[in-house]
Amino acid sequence: MQNSLENIESTMKCRNCGCSCASNFCPECGQSVKEKRLENKSFFISLLSGLSRINQGFLYTSWCLLINPWKVIRDYINCRRVRYIPPVSMLIVVCFLSAFVAGLMPVSEQTEIVDTGTGQLPLISQAVLMVTDYLMNNMLIRNLTIYIPALVAIPMVFWSVGARKYNLAEYFAAMIYMTSSLLIFGIIVKPLSILSESFSSALEILYSIIICSMSMYKAFPIPSLKKRIGYFLLYLILSVVIYLLIFLAIATLLQFSNTYN
């Protein structure tokens, strides 16, 4: 009789799914059976501990992405992931920080685009301006999409030297980590834009070229320096061509739209 009473007392009902549990965790949904209503003390303690874990992972991932993004990409692909923040989560946090830092900078005067020709901008210019304006006002979408043509060019150029061993998901994870790396560097050099916007932009472009070329070499090691440079130049050219094709496609759609309107 006493044993049955003890069993009844030790059995608890899961607050998430209603299953009767005899252990600390629900066998149906996995939630702890000790979950209680939110309390002031426990809420703020869990909040601080959660922020601490995020900060530790974010700082480590940021530093590794800044100096050696390919190491983060390689570790993540090879399932050594516990030390890093996942790609999309990392990009969201970096986008937030980038927007925050940009908001602290003095607002520069925007120059108006004046058409001195026949009174109407060329169609391709309209497409470029429209897409650029949209992406500039949607940071997360911009950083998730603007590097897709560069991503598409990688397997096309490096297919014969090892690109075939990676799948689409791994390429997207690599692209998102590389995007985060470029944004982190942009956050660091952003204060320099107060002194010189062109110097800050030049540093970002230089860093992009150096870090991308190093990552390409580590991903697809080519012994010959001449071939390595040739592959990378071909990659840059193909990326530019894909970008131009996208803008031409947008211009064509605009032309059809204007025709029917």
Image (cartoon, grey):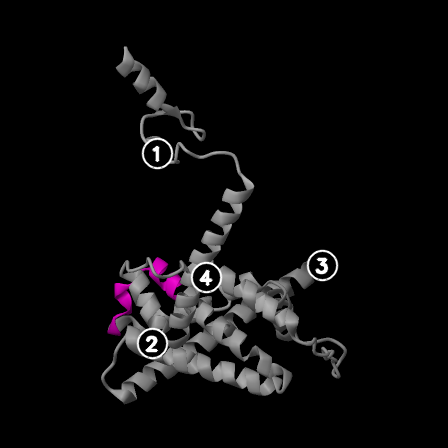
Which residue sits at x=34%, y=33%? 24
Residue 134 horizontal/vertical position (percent): 63, 65
Q: Earlier in the sequence, mark 2 or mark 4?
A: 4
Q: What is the quadrant of the C terminus in the image?
A: bottom right
Q: Are marks 3 and 4 in contact (CB under 8 Å)?
A: no
Cα distance, mark 2 to mark 1?
46 Å
Residue 85, given in percent of the width and then of the height, sits at: 40, 59
Q: Amino acid at mark 2?
A: Met
Three-letter code, disc 3: Asn
Mark 4, residues whose alpha carbon is within 10 Å: few (<14), some, or many (≥20)? Answer: few
Location of residue 162 by image quarter = bottom left
Q: Which residue is label 2 attached to?
A: 216
Q: Nearer the viewer, mark 2 or mark 1?
A: 1
Q: Nearer the viewer, mark 3 or mark 4?
A: 4
Secondary element at tag 2? helix
Coordinates of residue 55 in the picture (x, y in percent)? 45, 61
Which disc number belongs to residue 261? 3
Residue 230 lies in quadrant: bottom left
- Which of the labelled discs sits on residue 55, or is there none? 4
Mark 2 touches mark 4? (CB < 8 Å): no
Q: Nearer the N terminus, badge 1 or badge 3?
A: 1
Work out whether residue 17 can be spotted. Answer: yes
Magenta region: 161-175
Distance CA(mark 2)–CA(mark 4): 29 Å
Mark 4 or mark 3, which is nearer the start of the sequence?
A: 4
- Determine which of the numbered discs, if any, sits on residue 25 in the image: 1
